[in-house]
Image: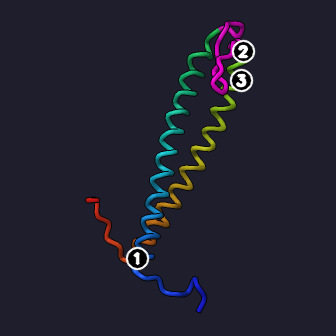
Amino acid sequence: MSDSEKPLDENEIIAKYKSLQAECQQYATKLSELDIELNEHRLVEETLTPLDPGRRSYRLIGGVLVERTVGEVLPSLVVNRQKLEEVVNNLEKVLMEKQKETTAWQMKYNIKATNAQ
């Protein structure tokens, strides 16, 4: 009998379930943070779009405030927003898969979740 076929004891089952729940919570927290950042990118993009491309703007890069023009900042902002949307979409898929795995584990071992901790 290999290690993967060896039956798990109750503590190992519960530990694995709690680990899966913790991973789901971490993914959800990160997703929430990225959603906020994505909304900020959209807001800034909507604000800068109607402005003159030669107008002065400031951008925070690595903790340093840098003076640029709207024409220089807007294209990189659009690219960053698009990449951020891709990351959010991928993270949503990962979270859904991890939630399915957690639910499957819960059903397989008939784990009753309690909200009081």
- In the rendered structure, which disc, 1 or 3, sits on the residue that comes first in sequence? 1
The amino acid type of the residue labelled 2 equals: Gly
- In whole angstroms, how far apart are the C-alphas of marks 2 and 1? 59 Å
In the image, 88: left or right of 13? right
Quadrant of residue 4 in the image?
bottom right
Q: Position of residue 93 (x, y in %)?
A: 56, 54
| Residue identified by numbered label 1 | 11
Name the front one of labels 2 and 1. Answer: 1
Mark 3 closeness class: few <14, some 14–19, many ≥20 residues within 10 Å: few
Q: Examine the structure image and report whether residue 67 is included in the region drawn in magenta.
A: yes
Q: Secondary structure at mark 3?
A: helix
Label pair 1/3, CB-CB below 8 angstroms: no
> Residue 45: x percent and y percent?
60, 22
Q: Distance from label 2 to label 3 (Cα)? A: 7 Å
Secondary structure under tag 1 reads helix
Residue count near mark 2 (Cα–Cα under 10 Å), binned few <14, some 14–19, many ≥20: some
* Start-end of magenta stretch: 52-71
The residue identified by callout 3 is: 75
